[in-house]
Image (cartoon, rainbow, N blue to C red):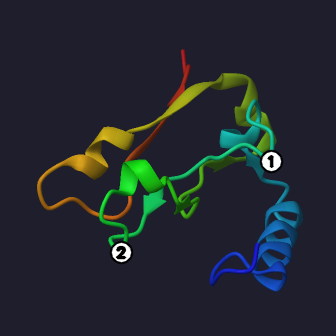
Amino acid sequence: LNVVSHTPVETESFEAMRRAGDWVDLMRLNVPAEQKLYTWWSYRAQDWQASDRGRRLDHVWSSPNLVERFTGYEILRPARGWERPSDHVPVIARFDLD
């Protein structure tokens, strides 16, 4: 990608930081890298849903010992369509801590 926040130097640095901390990208566990995984949509598009040109700016990472307790996540995409919404949508991560 060649857009601000997603240039090679930025994405490589971000990935190096994740690896250095031994963090697990929980949102990508079952979603291939080439598949869209957006949490942000610009206000520039008149119809953000039709254009579906977003970015992944929000992440859920954990330490390796929490991965087995991770039960899933939800990107609350409908929130982007609310009256006066944020350009980011909420992301919920679920863990079984019993």
User: Is the residue marked by circle 2 packed among few (<14), some (14-19), or many (20+) residues within 10 Å?
Assistant: few
| Residue in the image at 36% along x and 74% along y | 44
Between marks 1 and 2, how big is the CA–CA gap?
25 Å
Q: Quadrant of the C terminus?
A: top right
Q: Position of residue 89 (x, y in %)?
A: 37, 52
| Residue in the image at 70% along x and 75% along y | 6
Amino acid at dot 1: Ala
Residue named by callout 2: 44
Q: Which residue lies most toward the left here?
A: 83
Q: Considering only order in the chain, which callout, 2 or 1, is on the residue closer to the N terminus?
A: 1
Q: Which label sits in the foreground, 1 or 2?
A: 2
Amino acid at dot 2: Arg
Say if residue 85 shows up in the picture: yes
Q: Position of residue 60 (x, y in %)?
A: 60, 49
Element marked by disc 2: loop
Residue named by callout 1: 33
Say which quarter of the image contains residue 88.
Answer: bottom left
User: Is residue 70 shown left or right of residue 48?
Assistant: right
Q: Position of residue 93 (x, y in %)?
A: 51, 36
Say above or below: 12 vs 37.
below
User: Is residue 13 shown left or right of residue 51?
Assistant: right
Q: Position of residue 66 (x, y in %)?
A: 70, 34
State how many labels appear.
2
Residue 77 circle label: none
User: Is residue 91 shown left or right of residue 27?
Assistant: left
| Residue in the image at 32% along x and 57% along y | 47
Say if residue 89 shows up in the picture: no
Say above or below: 23 vs 13.
above
